[in-house]
Amino acid sequence: MAFIKLVVLTLFLNIVRYVIGIPIEAGTIMEPMHRIMPLYPDVFDNDFTGRDFAISLGYNFMLWFSAVLAFHAAQPALAGPTWLRSLKMFGIMALFYCSLAAVYMNHFVDAVKPFWFWSMIDALIIFPLLGIANALLYPRLFPRRIETKAAAESGH
């Protein structure tokens, strides 16, 4: 049952990511991040098909499912209220994501590196957003886990 709840949580986070995240990205990082793509069609696939979109949704689901699993496993050991524990874990996941983007950025020519830089900025926008959303949604799906943590912190 916990696995199904984690999948449901991830589905909700994906909805938040797209419904709230995309407008934020559109007003901040989308133009500079994607400006480079049409200039280098040998690096970026500018013919993004419906199949590519479905694959992208699957990859994004796995990214957020990884963050949800990490939070679920680590949150009992983290100090502070749920929102702070969630931001801590999603912050660690953002650090991992940015580190991976930096590794990839290091392997491309200078002209393509801005895409990876903006990808890191994107992570600094989206991971905290979903960290807050996770803090609001997680206790509704796992109330006893949160209550257990609160009781342990208060000494009861």
Image (cartoon, rainbow, N blue to C red):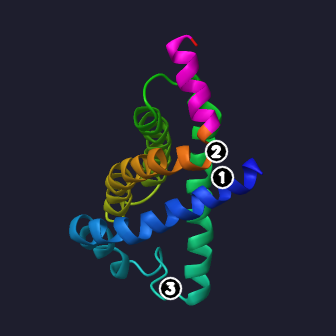
Q: Amino acid at mark 2?
A: Leu
Task: Classify residue 134 as left or right of residue 9.
Answer: left
Q: Nearer the viewer, residue 90 or 106?
A: 90
Write the residue at 33% across / 73% down: 34
Mark 2 element type = helix
Binning the other alpha carbons within 10 Å of mark 1 as few (below 14), some (14 to 19) or many (20 upward) gives: some
Query: Picture coordinates of residue 113 (x, y %)?
Result: 35, 59
Query: Comparing marks 1 and 2, which lies closer to the viewer?
Result: 1
Write the residue at 46% across / 76% down: 44
In the image, residue 50 lies in the stretch drawn in magenta:
no
Query: Comparing marks 3 and 2, which lies closer to the viewer?
Result: 2
Q: What residue did someone put label 2 on?
A: 69
Binning the other alpha carbons within 10 Å of mark 3 as few (below 14), some (14 to 19) or many (20 upward) gives: few
Q: Amino acid at mark 1?
A: Leu
Task: Report the disc number at residue 6.
Answer: 1
Do the residues bearing badges 1 and 2 touch, measured as CB atoms within 8 Å?
yes
Spatial separation of the CA atoms under disc 1 and disc 2: 7 Å
Task: Classify residue 148 as left or right of residue 113.
Answer: right
Do the residues bearing badges 3 and 2 touch, measured as CB atoms within 8 Å?
no
Query: Comparing marks 1 and 3, which lies closer to the viewer?
Result: 1
Query: Picture coordinates of residue 21 (x, y %)?
Result: 36, 65
Q: What residue did someone put label 3 on?
A: 48
Pick the quarter of the image with the C terminus: top right
Spatial separation of the CA atoms under disc 3 and disc 2: 30 Å
Residue numbers of the magenta segment: 144-155
Q: Name the N-terminal-most of marks 3 and 2.
A: 3
Q: Amino acid at mark 3?
A: Phe
> Which residue reaches farthest top?
155
Do the residues bearing badges 1 and 3 touch, measured as CB atoms within 8 Å?
no
Task: Classify residue 31 as left or right of residue 66.
Answer: left
